[in-house]
Amino acid sequence: MKKDLDDLKISGSSSLNGGEFGTVSISGSGKINGDVICNTMSISGSGKISGDVKTDTGKISGSCVIDGNLDCVDFKVTGSTTINRSVKGKEFKVSGSAKVNEISDSEYVKILGSMTCENSINTKNIDIYGSLKVNGDCNSDYVKSRGVFKIEGLLSADNIDIAVTGNNYVKEIGGQNISIKQGDGGMGILRVLLFKGYGRPKLTTEVIEGDNVDIEFTSCNIIRGKIVTIGKGCKVKRVEYTEELIINDDALVEEHEKY
C-alpha cells in the first residue's frame, strides 16, 4: 500500500466517506460510507463500514460491522465484529466474538473466544481454543482443537488433532491422520460449570474416513480407514478397515469388517 496517505480518525460521532488512508481509527462512534483501503485499522469504539475493507493490519477492541468483504494480512478481534461477506487474509485471530459469512482463503485462523461462520471456512491451519460454530464445511491442511465446536458439514484436513473438552458435533470427518482424544482438563472449573449436567464431554459425528484413525469418547455411525483404533468411551455402529483394527475393552463397536 502507499506510504504517504492521510489518516482517518473519528473520536466523537461522525459519518464519513470511504477511500484510501494510512491509518483508520475509531474511538467514538463512526460510520464510513463506501470501501476502505488502509495500512492500519483500529476500532476501540463503535464502527460501521458500508463497503469492503482492505488493510495490512487491523484490531477491533470495540465493536464493528463490515457490510462487505475483509481482505487483510493480520486481523485481530478482541471485542466484537460482524463481517457480512467474505474474509480473506493471512491471519485472522478472534479472542473476543466474531460473526462472519465465510472465510474464503486464509493461512491461519485462531479462535480463543467465540466465532460463528454462516457458510464455510477454507484455511491452511486452524486452532480452536474457544468455541466455533460453522453452518457449512471446514477445510484445512491442519486442524487443532482444544475447545468446542459445532460443524454442520464436513471437517476435512490432512491432519486433525482434537482434544475433547466439551460436547462437540461435526456431520462428517475426513483426513489422513485423525486423532480424537480425551481432553486434559485444562479448562478446570470453567469446564465443570459449562458442562455440568451434560455428562462426560464427547464428540458426535456420522462418518469418519481416514488413513490412520485413533479416537476416544466419540459416537459415530461408520468409520472407514486403514489403521483404526477405537479407544475408551467410544460408541460405533460399524467399522470398515483394510489393515488393522484395535478395540479398547471400554469401547462399543456393533460390527466391523476387514476389506
Image (tube, grey):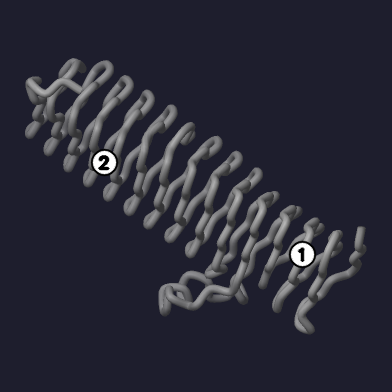
Q: Residues within 10 Å of mark 1 (few under 14, many from 20)?
A: some
Q: Residues within 10 Å of mark 2 (few under 14, many from 20)?
A: many
Q: Looking at the image, which residue is at 7% across and 34% down?
A: 11
Measured as percent of width and height from the top left, residue 152 is found at 63, 45
Given residues 80 and 138, the one toward you in this image is 138
Say which quadrant the N terminus sits in.
top left
Badge 2 or badge 1: first in the primary sequence: 2
User: Is 159 drawn above or below residue 85 in the view shown?
Assistant: below
**Disc 1 marks which amino acid?**
Ile
User: Is 78 drawn above or below residue 40 in the view shown?
Assistant: below
**Disc 2 marks which amino acid?**
Ser
Measured as percent of width and height from the top left, residue 208 is found at 73, 55
The residue indicated by pointer 1 is: 227
Q: Looking at the image, which residue is at 43% across and 60% down?
A: 129
Measured as percent of width and height from the top left, residue 219 is found at 73, 65
Measured as percent of width and height from the top left, residue 85 is found at 43, 27
The residue indicated by pointer 2 is: 63
Can the viewer see residue 113? yes
User: Is 77 drawn above or below residue 26 in the view shown?
Assistant: below
What's the distance in space between the residues labelled 2 and 1, CA to CA? 47 Å
Instruction: State the residue lying farthest toward the front.
Output: 243
SS type, badge 1: strand
Instruction: State the residue lying farthest toward the bottom.
Output: 249
Q: Looking at the image, which residue is at 21% across and 37% down?
A: 46
Q: Looking at the image, which residue is at 49% across and 43% down?
A: 124
Question: In the picture, residue 106 is in which quadrant?
Answer: top left
Say which quadrant the C terminus sits in.
bottom right
Given residues 26 and 172, the one toward you in this image is 172
Question: In the picture, residue 210 is in which quadrant?
Answer: bottom right
Between marks 2 and 1 in the image, the one whose residue lies nearer the viewer: 1
SS type, badge 2: strand
Can the viewer see residue 101? no
